[in-house]
Image (cartoon, rainbow, N blue to C red):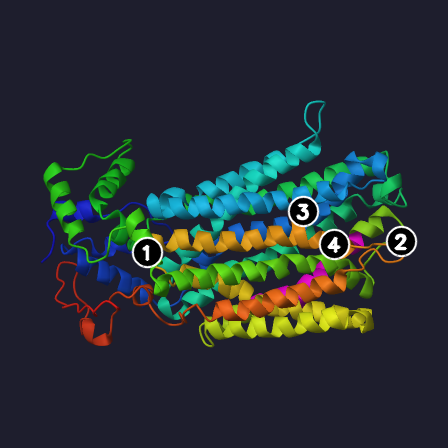
Amino acid sequence: MDATPAQIKANMTDGGNAAYHNFNNDFAHVQDPNERRRLALHEIDKAPFGWYHVRACVVAGVGFFTDSYDIFAVSLLTIMLGIVYFHQDAGTMSTPQDTAIKVATSAGTVIGQLGFGALADLVGRKKMYGLELILIIFATLAQALSASSQAVSIIGLVIFWRVLMGIGIGGDYPLSAIITSEFATTKWRGAMMGAVFAMQGFGQLAGGIVMLIVVAGFKESLESAKDYAHCTGVCVLAVDKMWRVLIGFGAVPGCIALYFRLTIPETPRYTFDVARDVEKAGEDAHAYMSGKAEGKVDDLVHAQGLVQGEQLEIPKASFSDFLKFYGTWKNGSILLGTAGSWFLFDVAFYGLGLNSSTVLSAIGFAGGSNVYLKLYNLAAGNCILICAGSIPGYWMSVATVDIIGRKPIQLMGFSLLTILFIIWGFAFDKLSGNAQFALYVLIQFFFNFGPNATTFIVPGECFPTRYRSTSHGISAASGKVGSIIAQAAIAPLRTNGATAANANPWLNHVMQIFSAFMFAGIFTTLLIPETKRKTLEELAGEFHFTNADLPAQPTSPGSIDAEIKVAEPAE
């Protein structure tokens, strides 16, 4: 039965733009909430791939562009801060200070992943999306404008702003993943989520390019000093400007995408499965268009809508339901698989950067006769490494994840990474510089054509709507805990027993440790389901469509004649 005009108005939700279509309002005329839910979700799942999806991927990918840009920039940031503020220590900050700045972002990211992940399930994706980007933009600009004083050191200020920036970056993980997943077509959902995540590769490359530009811009000033310890006068002034430009530029992409994030509609899955009250949202949308602060819902229509909401077949979210849901091995094991795989992977992923100096030496991009050449070679060498391994790996995942499947790619990745780290660790002393370069590129390739992409994709698909964002946040936070362990606990091991002749005597043992983490990842991967070409409702054990369930001919907006069938929930 069709809804009355008043009910149609009440059933409509606010939001929608060129990147995110409001599918819920296409079926606002359908009175039965279960039927309206199934029709709206089917429209999303079966939509042909088009520019609409490309725009959505770009908007969602901005956060990951910024995240990876920051990961690249922080290694250059600590070098330049050392030149500017620690001239008395030969232009180099201490190892604890360097580690604190690098770990600060990861610590904030854990908070953001857990906090924003839970809030997106509690109050909605729309209300949270964009807030995390505002926080990233604000903290990035504040960081670029920081300076030391008698009361606060530059290290303390940078750590403070990087923690806040990390919270924003952390919030982007579950929000962008879940919103992309819930708006994506089933056939290419993995590719869309992979493309969002693949923006990390372009973010790293952008960091290198921006660094090359600022180094070239201050070439004459930088050439005046032969090393960091002798960088004074115009040289130190140039470096002080350079690090601010490098960090501040990270806010630019976020400013461009902010409008689209703030104006997205609530995802239909959240509106139906969690909110269950679309009447107030519809009236608020009317009030917004009329220039009023808040809409007033007709009491009778509101009461009818609440009754309809109770008719939805999806369980209500609650703390007791959350414990009951994950208290069963079937569901809890999947969360263990996604969180465990991400944790194990990130230990090696972030730890591999410990050996980048060796690889850069092998390809002739380490050191230099003056500060200009040192910084130029560092930026150019990293750009080469990114283009050689990271970016091809990301886009190989995008191209194949909906064909091969998530689980096979993750198993293949962990298996090959185990072998590569074993070779590097146990044959370390026999490997030439070129051999280590080849291993580094292969590892980067199979990081990204492997667990780095799939650990992000699977948690955004395999959990029910009411806990999808929270579960993705838990999984992502587990990964960042792994990165903190890699940087704060495993990194110092490489200098164990260091001498003047060998600064990293334990580097081979660190690679051996990473091989053990990759081997363990094979077993956590066995706990996750294959999500390829399945609707989110199928993966959650709910109904799914077949061709027989749909009308033979398109129906007019005023007539829904299809009889929608519902599969029995999975046990």
> Is residue 390 part of the magenta span, yes or no?
yes
Q: Which one is closest to the eye, mark 2 or mark 4?
A: 2
Q: Secondary structure at mark 4?
A: helix
Name the quadrant containing residue 217: top right
Mark 4–mark 3 Cα distance, whole angstroms, equals 12 Å
Q: Amino acid at mark 1?
A: Thr
Tag 2 residue: 500
Q: Nearer the viewer, residue 180 or 544?
A: 544
Name the quadrant containing residue 149: top right
Mark 2–mark 3 Cα distance, whole angstroms, equals 27 Å
Mark 1–mark 2 Cα distance, whole angstroms, equals 56 Å
Q: First in sequence: mark 3 or mark 1?
A: 3
Q: First in sequence: mark 1 or mark 4?
A: 4
Q: Amino acid at mark 4?
A: Ala
User: Which residue is drawn at the image coordinates 38% and 63% (left, top)?
Assistant: 462
Q: Which one is closest to the eye, mark 4 or mark 3?
A: 3
Q: First in sequence: mark 2 or mark 3?
A: 3
From this view, report whether residue 230 is shown above or below residue 150.
below
Tag 3 residue: 74
Q: Position of residue 525 (x, y in %)?
A: 49, 69
Q: Nearer the viewer, residue 18 or 550?
A: 550
Q: Is residue 128 left or right of residue 308?
A: right
The N terminus, quarter of image? bottom left
Magenta part of the protein: which range? 376-394
Tag 4 residue: 379
Q: Residue furthest top?
A: 150
Q: Position of residue 239 (x, y in %)?
A: 77, 40
Q: Is residue 429 left or right of residue 39?
A: right
Image disc number at residue 465: 1
Q: Position of residue 357 (x, y in %)?
A: 77, 58
Mark 2–mark 4 Cα distance, whole angstroms, equals 26 Å
Q: Which one is closest to the eye, mark 3 or mark 1?
A: 1
